Amino acid sequence: MESGSPRAEVTVYSPLFSPFRQTLEAGAASIGRASDCTIPIKDRYLSRRHAEIARDGSGWVVKDLGSANGTYLNGDRIEAETPLKSGDRIRIGDTEIVFVASEHSTDRLAVAETVTSATIAIPVNETEPQDVARLQTLTLLARELIEDRPLSELFGFITERVMEHLRPSRTAIGLLASDGKSFINVEVRRADESDTSELTISQTLLKDLVHEKRALAYTDVGLDSKLSQAHSISAQGIHSIVCAPMMVGDSVAGVLYVDYLFNQRSISEEDVRLVAQVARFAAMKLEQTRLREQAIEKRLIDEELKTASMIQRRLLPEPPRDISGYTFAGTNRACRSVSGDYYDFVVRPDGRVYFVIADVSGKGVTAGLMMAGLQAAFRIFSKSDPDPATLVADLNAALKENLPQSKFVTLFLGRLDTATGLVEYVNAGHTPPLCVFRSGVHELTETDPLLGVITHAEYTNRRVQLEPGDSIVLFTDGVSEAEDVEGTLFGSTELADNLAPLHGASADILATVVDAAVLSHIGDIEALSDDLTVVVVSRAAAKEFGDETLIGKRRPMSA
């Protein structure tokens, strides 16, 4: 980062991966699905080059790069280049990016663009202290670290113990950011409470720590004018610095830093060995605590997700089973414990059947909650027997009022007249369904606006006739966009080829074939990257509903 430039970093949150931090360098940082973006994110709702964060004079701005689904800043869609301030939240697709800018801080461990040479360098595998007094100090410190403490308190506890046992002027613990060039979760302690200087280490020091895995000492660093640039007179009087890598396995997770002002004391190799061992103990304790808290949190989350999954399964209904002349099927495979897909059936007193399939943007608990709200609205609005266009317009108005601006729903809703086989339907931006006719498989491609995007969207009633033996197969894009190990999409064409021989088959058979075809394509159920939901409505080919001889053996089955 250029000297004097404002420091900034972003934390990226997505349901697709664990959060990560990214330091923003001078210039522009592009964000999108393309692999050559500064911050590549494999979010299906992102454009290849979706947005950009860039320096603008003394600050930072965000701008949309003509994306399909828009860029939102603190909930509002941006149309032009917009200034950023620390704490701003950028939403793109299912991804949220938290921007943090910071100026000079007494609680930072900064990296300076200076070139310095260590006066003592000891590899981490040669850092066992030999001096009895230092071994006693190390033993006492290790004993103090045995007690379990919350991770949020542990950083402060370790730096306090280092101050007590090593008597430095200042000490700091900093975990390395993902770029290996800056620090996160920094904790700083000072012997002089009036000292407001910023702690600074050189890039060469950090590089040696990370790549060479050596504990380093610098003496008389106050003679180096570049390294000693700081905001207090005391900082310019640094006499000695010791830095040691905090190792987790074979990787450097962070740095333990101590320094001594003026001619407070001389640094020996034994001092460096001691600091290195303290860094090793601190790293082990921090990693142990992190893993323990992670396991506890995961167990709690798993229990909550199991409960949420059980509740959601109960929300997805059993298909109607007692309607003469028709069969129905509904299946759902969640790529996570909780699905953002939704399907439903409502049988009206006059015999007509509403059926619906929807895909809420995103995955996990948030999408599941939105799905539950959609189901409640569908059940309420369908009670008055509206035509599909009116019903979808009512659902859109309800969702637009409650959905976050960056969220939306795709939906296909039909109403079947069981007396005639006529289906009235509306497609609100959903994956086009396939109709299995005697003449072949046909795609219903006409569509209307997504739900939750336009307040007063207009929807059109369309019709398709189901003759005996015909079926309509609805599915979410988890089916049509399922990828194999080489990234090849399953696609509607391949699905149509599997369905073509199945005219006259029951809904359960069709749903089973779709599920098996997708799993065969991806090769491994663990590779499922999106929720997979299928709804089938079939009109029986035989006069006698449920005649398996006529329906099941009429045509050869295709897997």
Image (cartoon, grey):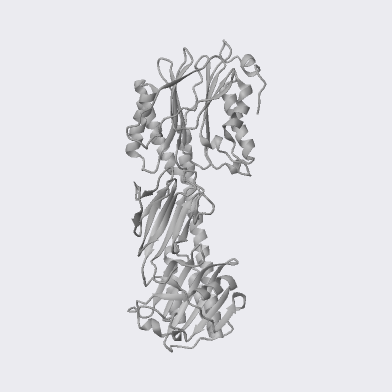
The residue nearer to you, when weighing 424 against 524, is 424
x 46%, y 41%: residue: 307
Query: Residue 537: x percent and y percent?
Result: 52, 22
In the image, is 32 to the left or to the right of 377? right
Picture mark count: 0
- Name the residue furthest top: 543
Query: Residue 92: x percent and y percent?
Result: 42, 48
Res. 280 visible in picture? no
The residue nearer to you, when weighing 404 against 5, is 5
Query: Residue 506: x percent and y percent?
Result: 58, 21
In the image, is 202 to the left or to the right of 485? left
Q: Quadrant of residue 260?
A: bottom left
The residue nearer to you, when weighing 483 against 402, is 483
The residue nearer to you, when weighing 511 against 349, is 511
x 47%, y 15%: residue: 418
Q: Is residue 125 above or below residue 175?
A: below
- Which quadrant: the C terminus? top right
Q: Is residue 541 above or below residue 265?
A: above
- Which quadrant: the N terminus? bottom left
